[in-house]
Image (tube, rainbow, N blue to C red):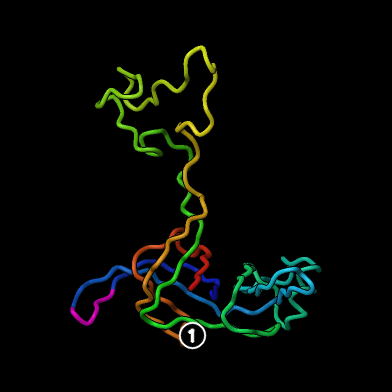
Amino acid sequence: MSGLIGRKIGMTSIFDENGKNIPCTVIEAGPCVVTQVRTNEVDGYEALQLGFDDKNEKHSTKADLGHFKKAGTVAKKKVVEFKYFEEEHKLGDVLTVDLFVEGEFVDVQGVSKGKGFQGVVKRHGFGGVGQATHGQHNRLRAPGSVGASSYPSRVFKGMRMAGRMGTDNVTVQNLRVLKVVAEKNLLLVKGCVPGHNNSYVIIQK
């Protein structure tokens, strides 16, 4: 799947030709540099490794500097491999937002916003004491009963409980490309994508 690494700028809305207001997300997609070409002969699989967002040299290891020097570029903050790329590319090639065209559909992957430690009502949608479910009767947002009887005398794995919420890898599929602004490396896709503003996202077509 062909794709690029990008950065989520934020959300806005635009009007289509019928005057309908469409919510969309602005993504800075590329430019990405081909930093390594994986081949069946050497690596056992075929893929392209792309690098995005320049990294300060003093914050880079010598191994990183040597790796990116082979591609003739500076060190990058974000590196992602893409398998089954539609076109062949060589080491050092620069891929831009021109890879996408208006009207096609893309998948966007990112890390969702972290929401900290949350209870079962917010995390799993429990009803609370108003519905008097899960064994509680006088505690508003408590989880209620979680265990079984004397057998098996334990709590099953996967039980919905309070815990850390967010910071998950999330992929939103089939987002329509509304606009491509090549001179500014911007991509506008319909709807929302995971992650906070300025977070890295992976766009695949």
Residue at horizontal 52 percent and vertical 67 percent from the top: 202
| Residue 48 image-quadrant placement | bottom right
Residue at horizontal 35 percent and vertical 23 percent from the top: 134
Nearest the camera: 202 or 147?
A: 147
Residue positioned most to the bottom = 183
Tag count: 1
Q: Label 1, secondary structure: give it.
A: helix
x and y percentages locating residue 162 in the rendered image? 46, 32
Q: Is residue 17 magenta?
A: yes
Residue at horizontal 40 percent and vertical 73 percent from the top: 105
Side of 31 relative to 11 (left or right): right
Residue at horizontal 28 percent and vertical 75 percent from the top: 14
Q: Which residue is mark 1?
A: 98
- Main SS, magenta residues: loop
Quarter of the figure that contains the N terminus:
bottom right
x and y percentages locating residue 108 in the rendered image? 46, 65
Which region shows up in magenta? 14-18
Q: Amino acid at mark 1?
A: Asp
Image position of 195 with respect to 132: above or below: below
Residue positioned most to the top = 150
Image position of 143 with respect to 19: above or below: above
x and y percentages locating residue 10 in the rendered image? 40, 66
Q: Is residue 63 magenta?
A: no
Side of 156 relative to 40 (left or right): left
